[in-house]
Amino acid sequence: MKAAHSEPAEEFLEAAVPSSLIRLILIIVFILISFTANALDSVSLNVGTLAGTQWKLEGINIALTDIQQNPQKLTLTIAKLSLPKPFNDLNLANIRCTSFTWQNKELLCEQGKAKIQSKQWQSPSTNFSFHVTEQRSSFKLTGLRLAGGIVAIDGEEQVELWRLHIDAKAVDGKLIQQLLPQEYFKLKAGKINVKLNACGSHARVHEFTLSVGLDGLTGQTKDGRFAAEALMLESTLDAKNYNGLWQWQSHIDVNGGALYVEPLYLEAAGQHIVWDAQGDWDASNNRVEINAANYKHSNAGEINGNATVHYKDELTIEKAQISLNSNNLQDVSAIYLKPFFEQTVLQDISLAGSLRADFLINDQSLTAMAATFDNFGVKDAAGRGEIQGGAGQVNWANDEFFSRPSKFFWQQLKVGGVAVGPAELSFLSRADSIRLLEKAQLPLLGGAIAINHFSWQARNQQEPEVSFDGSVNNVSLEQLSRALNWTPLSGTISGHIPRVEYSNKTLSLGGELIIKAFDGEIKISNLASSGLFTDFIKFHSDVEINNLDLDQLTGRFEFGGITGKLSGYVQQLYMENWRPVSFFAWLGTPENDDSRHRISQKAVQNIANIGGGGAADLLSRSFLRFFDTFGYDKLGMGCYLHNGVCQLMGVEARESGYAIVTGGGLPRIDVIGYNPRVDWDVLMERLKRITATDEVIVE
């Protein structure tokens, strides 16, 4: 039988086109029945093609038999169903329903079959059923084979409202890779479970719940910035649409395997990494409001906060409040900080202890911070410094009128090998500056360093400005030399540190630095240094030395013992990268020195070697070898360094050279230097080796 069109049928068809595809079946059947005579036992209709604006049914055929019986036998076949974007790559093919009934304006297909096809894959036949009434339509796809897994799809429409449920179990990651874009990422192993519940009206989604489970997933993006290894993850996303504003909440639980998100590597062995968040998404304004978020790494710490993010051209944090709480800064440092420290001056730094911190961000910039530390520690594998037993609170705001003070205490602080004892600093940090609020006393090597003033001021595109003054009181030279791996010295250091300033990449000393040591005094003046944080450091200074006790100075050295006093100076000292370039220096016996003057045989020999020359070793070839010490009147040596050559001089000129030591008392000994010009590197090598030469005469 061939059906003829009528105007009521066309109006009915046009009105139904926007409805679900399942309801089309009802339309077709109504058309068929409206042109079927009651006396017929069977009838069939070849509809051919039926198309909407974005979908298309091809090869439609309906056969109805045993019309006079109840129930009737109705068979529906459709060669192909094409879907709209973004599902236009998927097609239902060979749709067939053999157990099909119609009664009281109700259609029911209980035993249907269909195939799903795409450009990349094709499924075996899956179970298909539907149920259509005037007010309600529903369908089911069960047993759908997809990439080694099983997929079920359940949909329903009622008065232009629709609901959809998808359940995909144990989909093989390696097999599903063939169905996904190859240019972005590659899956190698693992299983994927997906559940989707969605509802809406027409083309609009009102709400949905998406659950994803990853079981042992391994793969990575093509650029290597994201990767997973045996990843175990559970994730849910719930969202509701209120007139274009999406309200959402999400949950992610990583409970096994590893995840790499450049540059972070997160390993979840024996621990959980959980992320919970909720907020609003305004798609029309490209804005996401994160009303509440919680990130918890069970062995490291927890982050809570909220934020407003804009993403039109680039991701921008308009504002955010973030709180960090960790009782294990060691893991925080190793997992979250170390990847960012690599290839920087901080790459050997690790932290320990606990931290509670609050951060405020506006327009991509940190505007306020409050951090509380307990049992805080810093270690530097490169040996540059260390903090143990740190505690306190640091407050900062980008506000020139901010006045909340900060305090920080430590049990021990190390700078290089030098240990500073327990101390507390009270300071104010705001905007681009730090200022000490109270004078501080730092225990150091049996003595102390007093800090009377300290300030630090940042400058745009320039080095910061630093100002400091204080004093050193009774610091042990013996402990200091041991900490710095020097030959042990005796005595203490005391002195005032005048105003020290760092500005325009130059460190300068405003006054004289006076050091009390070896029962004498060392004055440093005109000190200045530039390029401290570059590869080319320059240093200028003048040094004055007054009445140092030679017995204390030489008593701890292998150089040999000398008694008496030592005075001198180093004028116009200029160094580049800590290597002397030029200076004029003199060290010798001061005038009117009435102390006892004795010098050991070893010291005589070493002084002779430093001066250079070429004389017979009288100490070993004459009766002088039987004496341990000798008397002397004066000793002294000067150097004028220029162009890498040191012009040497002694306490007085001699025909054969210059006297370094002049004899006095018994037994008497003189040390004469022959060579007045010595290359600086050669002189330094002599100081290191202290070996005998043949260029010094000992008389």
Image: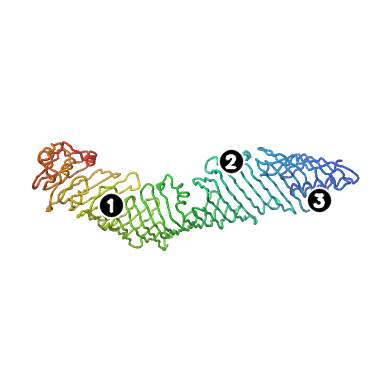
Q: Quadrant of the N terminus?
A: top right
Q: Position of residue 182 (x, y in %)?
A: 59, 38
Q: Residue furthest left?
A: 666
Q: Position of residue 584 (x, y in %)?
A: 20, 46
**Pointer 1: residues within 10 angstroms few (<14), some, or many (20+)?**
many
- Foreground pick, 90 / 71: 71
Can residue 643 be seen here? The reply is no
Q: Position of residue 638 (x, y in %)?
A: 17, 45
Q: Which residue is mark 3?
A: 106
Does residue 81 sit above or below 163 in this rendering?
A: above
Label 3: which secondary element = strand
**Pointer 2: residues within 10 angstroms few (<14), some, or many (20+)?**
many
Horizontally, residue 214 falls left or right of residue 472, namely right
* Three-letter amino acid code at the position of disc 1: Leu
Q: Which residue is mark 2?
A: 189
Q: Are marks 2 and 1 in contact (CB under 8 Å)?
A: no
Label 1: which secondary element = helix
* Three-letter amino acid code at the position of disc 2: Ala
Mark 1 or mark 3: which is in front?
1
Inter-mark Cα distance, 2 to 1:
60 Å
Q: Which mark is residue 387?
A: none
Q: Residue furthest front?
A: 626
Horizontally, residue 255 falls left or right of residue 476, namely right
Q: Which mark is residue 480?
A: 1
Inter-mark Cα distance, 1 to 3:
98 Å
